[in-house]
Amino acid sequence: MRRVGAEEIESLAIGAWILGTGGGGSPYLALLNMRQLYRKGVVCRLMGASELADDDLVAVVSNMGAPLVGQERLTDPKTMALAVTMMEEYLGRKFRAVMSLEIGGGNSIQPFMAAAMLDLPVVDADCMGRAFPEAQMTSFAIHDLTMYPLTLADVRDNAVVVARAASWKWMERISRKACVEVGSIASTCKAPRTGKEVKECAILGSTTKAMTIGRAVQAARRAHRDPIDAVLEVEAGVKIFTGKIHDIARRTTEGFLRGTATIEGLDDFRGHDFRLAFQNEFAVGWLDGEPRVMTPDLICVLDTVSGDATGTETLRYGQRVTVIALPAPPILLTPKGIEHVGPRAFGYDLDFRSVFA
Amino acid sequence: MRRRIGIDVGGTNTDAVLLEEDAVAAAVKTPTTADVTTGITRALAALVERAPTARGAHAVMIGTTHFTNAVVQRRDLGRVAAVRIGLPSGASLPPFVDWPEDLAALVRGEVVMLEGGHEFDGRPLVPFDTKGMRAAARRIREAGIRSVAVSAVFSPLNASGEEEAASILLEECPDVTVTLSHRLGRIGLLERENATLLNACLIELARTTTRAFSQALRASGIAAPLYLTQNDGTVMLAEVAEAYPVYSFASGPTNSMRGAAFLSKRDEALVIDVGGTTTDIGSLRHGFPREANNVVEIGGVRTLFRMPDLLSLGLGGGTMVGPAASLTIGPASVGYRLTEQALVFGGDVLTVTDVAVAAGLIDLGDRARVASLPAARVEEALARIRSMIEEGVDRMKTDAGETPLIAVGGGSFLVPARLAGVSEVLNVPHQAVANAVGAAIAQVSGEVDQIFQDLSRDEAIARARQLATDKAIAAGADRATINVVEVEALPLAYLPGNSLRTRVRVVGEIAR
């Protein structure tokens, strides 16, 4: 267990936005909340999963909803903490710690917001290792852990407990419905996990990983070095393409923001083109018409100059970007993992082939 | 005959042009003065002297960076009461939360957070706390604050809360000026609120400056209505514009790109504006600058203003050229001291202008003072400049084909006639005053950015277009000339039904 400095939360925000692979929502507002809390003297603690006892109980938290609504109804640590205390009341047991559902995007910081309010430590882990759009796309679902109960808190004192669900997909449908009713933004505490489950089934060390990536970007910027090279170095990533966004098409179906971006090559990639398909997150990329990179490998689109991550909602014509791939957590690469989060889970009839194979 | 005067108040020069129908009849360049209005008066006097018909102009458009500079330099800013309507949502991130502390300390008066606001579909979040608003209005009056910024959750979709707050404020404190966020911004509460706060802190300055501009105009014997140019290349009547100073933040580069389009008669091209210290490269689409989508910081404050997407290079007429051993171009520049420090003006600094004179690209100062520069060095420097420009042009291009490039600005002589990836370099008359021309030709606009539900894409766009057209007409546009210049329909993830965030912008000529 160790104390987390304010500057580490800054690094976490940068790294988590990169690990968001285009989705997960910008961590900016959550970061602002943490700055406020640290200014008031809060110091969060981070613990390794190995420090958990097998029967400890861990709260898995996330903000649920439409990123655009989140830009108006600003995220609040109180509501986040409320979802956790609701769960404690429902279970009649206290949590030992909180952890993140997804390390990619704003949900990387939500557990710190809850932890600050509840004076609990944050476990250095998540269950996606990146961002994914749906509840069944987690390492816990891949391990067939129970998916209920779930608590959902709205800022107006509306609260929902989903006591049971027949499957991860049912849990997704029911909780999504409740979320839409309260304005498409809510704080949720997912099915509680035991220390044993976290140790065996979570993606461990992902908070530290996001902080390391963020720190590398910050150091590179300070030294006027290429921040993208810095990310590739610390994460053993691969540069996939550099270019300029040439065309972008989006549509929503079944709650997904789907679309494709076409990137025209610059620098070393002049004369080549790259097509990137997304479903909230970047899913598959084709180099000159041939599949080059696909989920669950992490496909990150970064601003070529600043190294800042770009979300699928903010991609824009003419933007100059670099596409990189980072290795996915091993659990996502197992046959069961590929079933949950491989290209076919997103409707692409492709056999998964890792860039890193 | 239709006569329009365009004025650009820049950091170094105040330029003025007279347009008769669509031709530049006269153009002048005068030094900018510390009080701004003296410079304008002088520029107008010079213009009238050259073309007496300027007195009969039908409209005068001024573009100025005065308000941006006030924020950046932290001067002439007023104290503001911030009213946020949206509790219980967003309580942990109050107004000014992400402002630089020095600026917040200058601007922050009262901070009031009240229950109210709306959902993305227009339903109320909770009822608006009108009692709380009335009590706050009284506190604001007692504190002697004269400018109030009101922002409500999802007000771009439903402005009723902000409107009600304004009427309560005006009942309780009739002397205050109220800025409402839905008039200024888009979806994104913090950024929209920041724009509203910036506007509110500039409102006193905007009023006095705009009135001084009007006086300068009258003193010059010109009776035409005065317009101020906006970030998007359009204008607002000065008496309307004085309520929205933030809308002029990026008008400088916009005017120069619009002027370039007009002078070259090209709507789709790249524009390169070479000044004394920097070169800006932008892209014209339908005669307007392509805009950046990203968050724009003004004086350290995050906003969502639509700004032209520009690539700035450290290259201008005053840019210093390094020693022979390691020939480098910039980024240091002698800036406005060019006429003292450059070799051709008797100084001892080798600048890009000296290289251009030596190469015969332009005739300035004393050419004999650069005669001894080795030809190889001049050639190498020009080659470096060329590759800087070619690289920049390539980064701004949005397709692989060759694109025309319009060269404007005082340093446009630095742009080579032939460049890789460029179909032709367009040098046009009056290119040095393109920004004043851009001001003179500005039109009136209307814009809508809303979420529409359960409408087809076409229906949503049609509805947005109607709303935008109504706004443009209210701002002074002639209905018959209204044109749609931008349409964007973005489906939204995780919202029910078919939710489309639709943005439409229309422009029209000034109604006469």
Image (cartoon, rainbow, N blue to C red):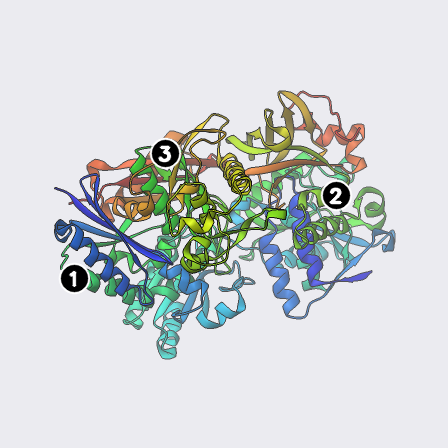
- Pointer 3 indicates a residue of which chain? B
User: Where A124 falls versus B82 (above or below)?
Assistant: above
Q: CA distance from mark 1 to mark 3?
A: 37 Å
Callout 1 and callout 2 share a chain: no
Q: Nearer the viewer, residue B149 or B8?
A: B8
> Dot 1 lies on which element?
helix
Identify the mark at residue B268; answer none if there is no mark: none
Question: In this rendering, does residue A43 appear at all?
Answer: yes
Q: Nearer the viewer, residue B485 or A105?
A: B485
Query: Which numbered disc, 2 or 3, marks the residue closer to the eye?
Result: 3
Q: Residues within 10 Å of mark 1 (few under 14, many from 20)?
A: few
- Pointer 1 indicates a residue of which chain? B
Residue type of the residue flagged with mark 1? Arg
Residue occupying image coordinates x 75% and y 28%: A354
Among the 4 quarters of the image, the one containing residue B467? top left
Q: CA distance from mark 2 to mark 3?
A: 57 Å
Reading the image, the residue beneath label 2 is A127
Reading the image, the residue beneath label 1 is B218
Q: Position of residue A324 (x, y in %)?
A: 68, 36
Label tally:
3
> Dot 3 lies on which element?
strand
